Amino acid sequence: MLRYPQFTIDEIMAVLRRRKKFFFYPLILISVVSISGTFLLPQKYKSSITISVQKDAVLNPLVSYTMAVTAASDDRLRDFNEIVHSRPTIFSLMDSLGLNKVVRTKEQKEQAIKEIKEDIETDLRGSDLFTINFFNEDPDRAQDGARILSELFIKKRLEVNNKENELAVEFFENKLKDLGDKFGLSQQQYIETVRSSVLPGGDSYGLPSRIGELESQIGSIDARIISYQTALKILRNTSSNFEDPTTITNYYKVVFLDVPDADQLRLLLNKYEDMSKRYTSNFPDLTALQSKISDLTGRMKHTIESELSRQQNQVWDLQKQSSNVIGTIRSAEVNKNQNEDIRSTYEVYNKLYNDMKIKLEQARTNRDLGEKGAQQYIVIDPPQYPVHPAKPNRLLLIGGGIALGLFIGLLAAGFMELFDTRIRTTRDIEVYDKLVLAYLPSYHKTND
């Protein structure tokens, strides 16, 4: 039996003519819906901001040099998407744009958060460049939203970095204190050994007593340093919001520490306590007093930082003198083979202690630079005011609708033709695989 391998163009056109309703109805319907959608869907404007992140000036002293370089390159935009799409960031954005005024119930709040997340697009280009896109029906809000999102990300990233730097400083301070205790113990053991073996006359050279004087001075300054560090930590972690009751409480904690200007701060706090009991927070004299306290605490912070650095240098100078005295004692040794373990332990702790002091200074420098970390973020392309809406894409929506209508129309016409059992051509007979005796033409009566 003869088989036709494919349809001809004429047959396909005949099918479309017979099934034109099933072809044109989906095409017209879907095209009308897509065209209507381009005008009925809400228009949204897009604004973008592109920011470059500069490399850290000081590497992390907690890790080796190679690891620190890698971390400085890879971690500057760590958690970028998580921070931008986090709920606290979305809440702050809604508050800044005034979108939370229309949210009354929890369901509305969750829906608003979901919609805003869908309006945020991020693009992370390598490890030092990122772009934030924000869509909104209001072009002003679109521009403000892109700017606010970048500011919120930078603020949160700096908070995390500053917290990490502060923890690193605390770690090295505690480690230095621990090593200092062990170093002092090994130093004392070494001195006693040298005194008994090298200097039988005890204090004949006056060197051990000199070391005792130096250690006494170091202990006194160390106590003052601890007091300064405690006061500085309190001042850094205390905001200038006098409506917060913890602010005054923290300032009083500073007063009882041995720090510069503590007496002046005590007088201002006592005066503030007295006036706050009699007047409201809006009273001019009370507001002026709050400003004086804030200015004084700001000056105290800088004074304590300078004094802390000076005291630390003084301690290190005294420790250097102590090491020189011990070196003098060591030079007088007559029996180098005695008490080798004690001397070795002292040298090990001396090296560890000096290395830890260097790392502590690096961590403090890193922390101080981190407080000015906002300068690392440079705006390459600020958010522009959008003139034309970015959504919906009318050309894409109309073209896609017409293409979908054509596809569904062709599919519908093909299905209807496939399931139609009426015989129109010889092909419709041959599919039954039966013998054909003859083909009879159809009879059409014509009117003469």
Image: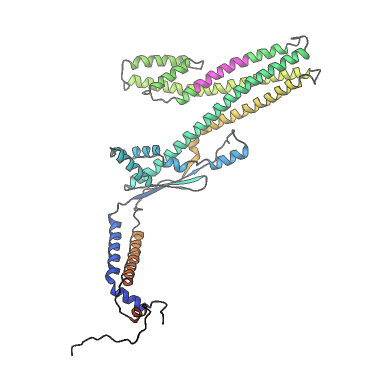
Going by the image, does 297 lie left or right of 34? right
Which residue occupies the extreme left position in the image? 448
Tell me, yes or no, if residue 292 can be seen here: no
Which residue occupies the extreme right position in the image? 334
The prevailing secondary structure element of the residues shown in magenta is: helix
Is residue 218 covered in magenta? yes
Q: Magenta stretch?
A: 217-232
Is residue 345 covered in magenta? no
- Percent of width and height locating residue 298: 46, 24
Q: Please report the residue visible at 27 percent of the width from the left and 55 percent of the height from the top.
A: 40
- Percent of width and height locating residue 201: 77, 9
Q: Quadrant of the N terminus?
A: bottom left
Q: Please report the residue visible at 50 percent of the width from the left and 41 percent of the height from the top.
A: 78
Q: Quadrant of the C terminus?
A: bottom left
Q: Is residue 377 above or below residue 232?
A: below
Tell me, yes or no, if residue 300 can be seen here: yes
Asked whether 79 or 11 is in front, the reply is 11
